[in-house]
Amino acid sequence: MVDISEFEQISPYVRMVRLKKEASMSGKWKDIDNVFTYIASGSADFILDGFRYSLQAGNAIIIPPFMTHVIISKGTEALIQYIVHFDFYESEERKCLIHKDVLDEDEKHLTASGQEKLLKDQAVIAVIPEMDRNQLMYTYLNMLEEFCGSRLGRNLMLKAGCMDLIIATLRNCVDINEEQNNSRRKTKSWVHIENAMDYILGCDLREDLSNDSIALAIGVSTNYLTSIFQTYLGISLHKYVTNVRIERAQQMLLSGRVNITETANLTGFSSIHVFSKTFKSIMGISPSQFLDEIVTKSNNADRFTQLQR
């Protein structure tokens, strides 16, 4: 169990607040900061350094900096995640770091300082009591509004909200007993799964990413790779590749450097029609709606964050 007293002197710095809603998703990430996630709807497997944790609506998790994590949505209900990227302590040096995934980057100049290792490289998982969930969601949605705005006291409100989320997670964290750990222990198959994911993430998405080509690249048979992907991750290898394409498409659209047609081409779709149909099936909205509803808000938040630095 986490010793809450170790967190009594923290003064959080909130780097990013974002809400993710997707009908279906899977991906692999590594972040420069602590990541709080509350599952508001749906369910997903969070695979942290090869160990699986099944989370559902009402669960919260804090993932420490630079922990590789894979998220695979489950069931038919849309996965809605309330996400806050934060440091436990505000420092001028780390305030200069921009929110981004660093999975493929050299970490020598990005490693977290000692004071950001309060979680000791262990994720914290909580079951938020039903009576407290509305308050947690209210706190988060207020933070999202503050983050995207410019009202007086914005940073203080973000700090206070982040403190509330951290306290709620620590107070309601669950122990993972030995039996549960045994069921989540890494298997030999995970090495091949991770090799396949690393290969996919490192590819130009316009290349051939068929099941056969991926299996050949990592040195295993196609049948074996597709079997362990389905067994361990609960989705097909083909669907994982599709989800990676859509995740990359979101990043491209968010950058503002390419339009929808260019994004479709750069992520390996045969036409803008196929891209738009696939995007909507996964995200629940079309690429143009994504631009209108998500990008505008994100750009406003990013511009304000830059002005504050």
Image: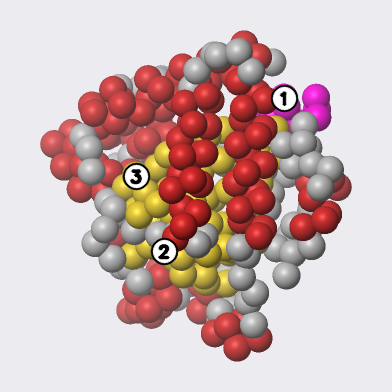
Residue at 29% over, 53% down: 78
Percent x, y for residue 262?
29, 27
* Amino acid type shown at disc 1: Cys
Place residue 74 in its image quadrant: bottom left
Q: Nearer the viewer, residue 168 or 223?
A: 168
Percent x, y for residue 97?
69, 29
Quarter of the image for the C terminus: give it.
Answer: top right
- Using a 10 Å C-alpha cutoff, classify the residue at mark 3 as few (fewer than 14 neighbours), some (14 to 19) or many (20 or more): some
* Amino acid type shown at disc 3: Lys
What residue span does the magenta drawing correspond to? 91-99
Residue at 53% over, 25% down: 147
Q: Which residue is mark 2?
A: 56
Q: Is residue 59 left or right of residue 289?
A: right
Dots 1, 2 in contact, CB < 8 A: no
Asked whether the viewer can see residue 122, the reply is yes
Q: Which residue is mark 3?
A: 21
Q: Which residue is mark 1?
A: 96
**Above/below status of 72 relative to 78:** below
